[in-house]
Amino acid sequence: MPLWQELPLLLVVAFCLAVLIRTFLMQAFYIPSGSMEDTLLVGDRVLVNKVVYDFRDPERGEVIVFRGPDNWAPENRTDPDAGFFSKLGRTVGDLVGISQPGEKDFIKRVIGVPGDRVSCCSVEGWIYINGVPVEEPYVIRNSPLESGGEAKSCISRKFDEITVEPGMLFVMGDHRLVSQDSRCQGQVPIDNVIGKAMVVALPFDRWGSVAHQEVFDKVPAPGTTALGAPGADPVPTTELAVVAPLLLGLSLLRRRYRRQPGA
């Protein structure tokens, strides 16, 4: 059978595979705001592992995508007057994981896990976790130490100590000056987590992993004050099995892109 006759079937198969991957394994997530700068920029697309948290809970320092609780104000507002074809395109794009996120989808960094005591600030202006000051090198633009902002605004860097509740996470954006996060909007249920941000896939010139932050390795377990907590566990086999083929494909695409004239 000529290839052109097989093309419709191939497109259907490709679409079905994309839907299956997006639903169960991996999803491309569009960065809609500047709340994670400079780690993630507006317009970046990151690959989100949707399997890893089926086997363990999120850890400090990981960047996660989650559905915001009802009390969280949206960072990415959709157009309520969008036409039929615009809504249809968004629906199809959402099925294969290439559309922009919904109003209640967020991406932030995990700062505190259940039982952690989190506050700000130390003498150096750093956050405290379980009595240990943590310097965050990925925070390029921090909030001012003092601010006269509204009570429900995350403008100020300072906040009183909170204890992360069971089944909850304390999350913050890397661009603390603009991020609306757990400082003022509250904690996030672990059940709301969609997945872990693994790789910046697009644009190609920003391709790279969203790495684990070693600064959290020294934080003791909740309920303790001793230093010398063990380092991060190795990447689970399940996570590698899902991500490795995609990383290989992205690496090949990146090399091909760089070899093109003018790239």
Image (cartoon, grey):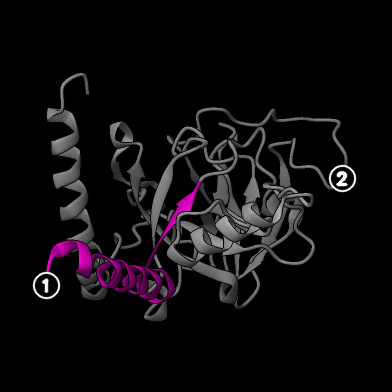
Q: Quadrant of residue 39?
A: top left
Check disc 2 and give the amino acid type: Ala
| Camera-side residue of 185 and 132 | 185
On residue 118, the disc is none
Can residue 50 be seen from the camera position used here? yes
Q: Residue, x 28% and y 42% (percent of image)?
A: 208
Q: Can you identify the residue that label 2 sits on? A: 151
Q: Which residues are magenta?
A: 1-30
Q: Residue, x 29% and y 73% (percent of image)?
A: 13
Q: Quadrant of residue 114?
A: bottom right
Please tell me whether residue 12 belongs to the stretch shown in magenta: yes
Residue 67: image x %, image y %?
62, 65
Check disc 1 and give the amino acid type: Met
Q: Quadrant of the N terminus?
A: bottom left
Q: Quadrant of the C terminus?
A: top left
Q: Residue, x 72% and y 48% (percent of image)?
A: 77
Can residue 130 be seen from the camera position used here? no
Mark 1 or 2, which is nearer the eye? Answer: 1
- Secondary structure under tag 1 reads loop
- Secondary structure under tag 2 reads loop
- CA distance for labels 1 and 2: 68 Å
Residue 135: image x %, image y %?
46, 39
Query: Local crowd at mark 2 within 10 Å, few (<14), some, or many (≥20)?
Result: few
Q: Quadrant of residue 103?
A: bottom right
Q: Can you identify the residue that label 1 sits on? A: 1
Residue 120: image x %, image y %?
65, 44
- Quick check: 122 left or right of 37? right
| Camera-side residue of 139 and 224 | 139
- Total marks shown come to 2
**Which is the main secondary structure of the residues drawn in magenta?**
helix
